[in-house]
Amino acid sequence: MEAIQYSSYKGGAAGLKRVQLPIPEPKKGEIVVKVEAISLNPFDWKIQAANVRPFLPSKFPFTPCTDIAGEVIKVASDVKKFKVGDKVVAMLPPPNGGGLAEYAAVKATQAVIRPHQVSAAEGASLATAPLTAYQALTGSGGLPKDGSMTHIKNILITAASGGVGHLAVQLAKILAPKSHVTATAGARNIDFVLSLGADEVIDYKTPEGKTLQSPSGKKYDLVVDCAAAGTPWSTFSKVMSEKSKIVFLDPSPKNLWTLIVRKITLSKKKVGILFTAQKSDELEFLVNLIKDEKLRVKIDTVYPFSKAEDAWAKCIDGHATGKIIVET
Ligand SMILES: NC(=O)c1ccc[n+]([C@@H]2O[C@H](COP(=O)([O-])OP(=O)(O)OC[C@H]3O[C@@H](n4cnc5c(N)ncnc54)[C@H](OP(=O)(O)O)[C@@H]3O)[C@@H](O)[C@H]2O)c1
């Protein structure tokens, strides 16, 4: 089978190499999937860029990517949940990667069935990005999962045109239909983000965008910061309500410092940093939202496997509207 790997830090798309590897055999508890679609996430190129050195990757050469959709071709004898021919969505663990290949070995616990209504491209989009959005809003952000009453009335989602942000806007409205959602995006994406259900959208390049002030004067009870823009804490603090929370998706030293200082000073404006966890019950919930047409994935571009390097470069560029997909 063909796989795409890199053998050292840095190098961007030019550092990717195509290699021939044996099709994996399923170990205990595993299935082998013929990959149909892979979704790229910024974390994939950030590992290559040495942002999480020395923790990731676990070894070189490394086959990147975690989010795949495909068809089960082999099943270990102890796996009862899947059979050959099942269509699945899976999230591989980031230390192992292995997604940017024609076949992948997947722990059965990390896969869920993909209903026929969900395309392979949609399915591949349904791991890291929506799980991040969901866990930021619920686990870290404090929105109830069952739609019950919450003190969280006003929500800000930054970079709402991106892979995570466009799903976070929709999930905020699903989880808390009465909430008021303010979002930030570039001018070209304002109508798109409004179509997702945002109540107001601020162009992030304008003076209002830089101060994150709600056009209707709202103070935010919950902020999900999907932009890796390094907005200072003082900017967020001014627009957050007295008892509020911000969830950073970027575990930068600056955001970690903000978290430590808020904890030490017992601030009522709380800070969380999210590390997305693979949870197949949540993945299944999200797949079903797509199947039932309650959630929609915006796909920026689908690249054939022969052009995966272009997809990688597009992801590094950071200007996708929605998800970037590679199809085998
Ligand atoms: N902690 C975790 O476990 C975890 C998990 C997933 C993702 N993340 C992080 O979350 C962040 C978002 O991921 P993603 O997949 O959504 O990224 P993405 O799809 O690459 O985001 C690109 C989008 O963000 C917009 N954007 C960029 N800077 C902006 C700003 N300052 N204000 C408003 N919009 C802005 C861009 O709009 P324009 O084209 O108009 O500039 C583009 O549409 C990344 O830093 C990623 O590493 C963390």
Image (tube, helix red, strand yellow):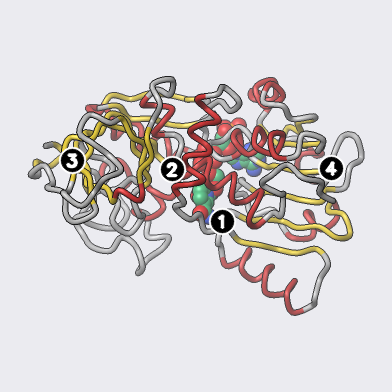
Picture quarter with the C terminus: top left
> Which numbered disc, 1 or 4, marks the residue that appears first in the sequence?
4
**Nearest the camera: 288 or 184?**
288
The local crowd at label 3, few if under 14, some if 14 to 19, many if 20 or more residues have their Cα within 10 Å, is: many
Q: Quadrant of residue 22?
A: top left
Under 8 Å from ligand 1: the CB of mark 2? yes
Question: CA–CA distance between discs 2 and 1?
Answer: 13 Å
Question: CA–CA distance between discs 4 and 3?
Answer: 46 Å
152 left or right of 89 in image = right
| Relative height, residue 151 to residue 73 (above, below) | below
User: On the image, numbered disc 3 is attached to which residue?
Assistant: 3
**Nearest the camera: 57 or 117?**
117
- The amino acid beneath tag 1 is Asp
User: On the image, numbered disc 2 is attached to which residue?
Assistant: 41
* SS type, badge 2: loop
User: On the image, numbered disc 4 is attached to which residue?
Assistant: 213
Question: CA–CA distance between discs 1 and 3?
Answer: 29 Å
- The amino acid beneath tag 3 is Ala
> Which numbered disc, 2 or 1, marks the residue that appears first in the sequence?
2
- Measured as percent of width and height from the top left, residue 84 is found at 20, 33
| Relative height, residue 171 to residue 29 (above, below) | above
Q: Quadrant of residue 171?
A: top right
Residue in view at x 48 percent, y 46 percent = 281
User: On the image, numbered disc 1 is attached to which residue?
Assistant: 250
Q: Residue furthest bottom?
A: 264
125 left or right of 306 in image = right
153 left or right of 16 in image = right
Q: Are marks 2 and 1 in contact (CB under 8 Å)?
A: no
